[in-house]
Amino acid sequence: MKFLDQARVYVRSGNGGAGALSFRREKFIEFGGPDGGDGGRGGDVVVEVVDGLNTLIDFRYQQHFKAKTGGHGMGKNRAGARGADAVLRVPAGTQVFEEDGETLIADLTKAGERVVIARGGNGGFGNAHFKSSTNRAPRRANPGQEGEERTIWLRLKLIADAGLIGLPNAGKSTFLATVSAAKPKIADYPFTTLDPGLGVVAIDGREFVLADIPGLIGGAHDGAGLGDRFLGHIERCRVLLHLVDATGEHAGKAYKTVRRELEAYGARLGEKPEIVALAKIDAIDAAALKAQSDRLRRAAKRKPLLLSSASGAGVTAALRAVLAILDEAETKDGSAPPAAAWVP
């Protein structure tokens, strides 16, 4: 399935049904009177979160959603049926914006959440509604109200506990494939990852979700490379794991390049807890490793972790460091850390 994290959609709720103009005409009933029923309410347009989705690709093939018109009123005081709703099924983490792309309508994060974004029109009154002691034969019925129409933006931000960041070819996809069952594309050239990916990591009887996003380069906030739009997928993460390629020219400069892009993007990404790790340590000798580690330590102002996804060295320590920050964040939120999985 292809990944799509943004879609522009036109929606229109249903019109209300018209009221009926009708009179009783049964045999042997001397004073029949009006019996026109009311029209039914038009259908709403609803956005609903469902399980089993992780992309907005369905909205590439259908961009127009219209709810049904309410049924018209009928004689014998029969009211029209309510129009069927139009339901837009989206994955958890979807945000709904106005047409300007900036005004937030709803932020849907849990399966089962629903929001009505266009309400159907009310049905019109039939002539039975207007009868009175002075107007016993009203010849008046209302048409149904018009529905609402609007254009909205759907924007998906993946829900993950931790996020992988770094320059292209820093070893993020290899790390994700090593620690989870995810199967991202891995190759020895930059920008192998074109779409964000998710993996469930199990460590010490616990699990958390790890997100891998395409690599950043200098000037990404101005559109260089793949740009920085994918950074939206780590806005919800509680900790960032920053991988720096040990085989690169200068680990310190590589670290600062990514940090500048985080600060330029905003959304308080630069304030998130960060774990810094020097990756691919198995590909260089001891002297080069010490030099790169020292450069990264000076740039990050902390001692970096050393790891190799290929050999597995340092991977468990990195995952435990992520888990420790997640537990700390859950404690600050007032919730207890998740219990370890039961093992017979």
Image (cartoon, rainbow, N blue to C red):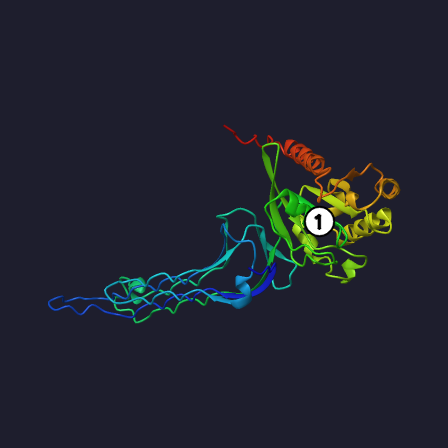
Q: Can you give x and y, in whole percent of width and height, for residue 206 in the image?
A: 59, 34
Q: Can you give x and y, in whole percent of width and height, for residue 340 in the image?
A: 57, 30
Residue at coordinates 78% horizontally, 43% vertically from top-left? 282
**Residue 63 visible in the picture:** no
Q: Which quadrant of the structure image shows residue 330?
A: top right
From the viewer's side, name the closer residue of 140 and 343.
343
Q: Can you give x and y, in whole percent of width and height, for residue 192 in the image?
A: 70, 58
Q: Give the left or right position of residue 185, taking residue 81 as reference.
A: right
Q: Is residue 145 above or below residue 48?
A: below
From the viewer's side, name the closer residue of 344 and 283.
283
Q: Quadrant of the N terminus?
A: bottom right
**Residue 80 visible in the picture:** yes
Farthest-out residue, top: 344
Q: How many marks?
A: 1
Q: Give the left or right position of residue 180, taking residue 134 as reference.
A: right
Q: Is residue 322 above or below residue 112?
A: above
Q: Secondary structure at mark 1?
A: helix
Q: Which quadrant of the structure image shows residue 142?
A: bottom left
Residue at coordinates 52% horizontally, 53% vertically from top-left? 53
Q: Is residue 143 above or below residue 232?
A: below
Please give the residue where the numbered disc 1 appears in the rendered image. Answer: 172
**How dense is the environment of label 1, judged by Cα within 10 Å: few (below 14), some, or many (20 and up)?**
many
Q: Can you give x and y, in whole percent of width and height, for residue 47 in the image?
A: 50, 56
Q: Give the left or right position of residue 94, taking residue 146 as reference.
A: right
Q: Is residue 206 above or below residue 96?
A: above
Look at label 1 and name its amino acid: Lys
Q: Give the left or right position of residue 113, taking residue 182 as reference.
A: left
From the viewer's side, name the closer residue of 266 and 284.
284
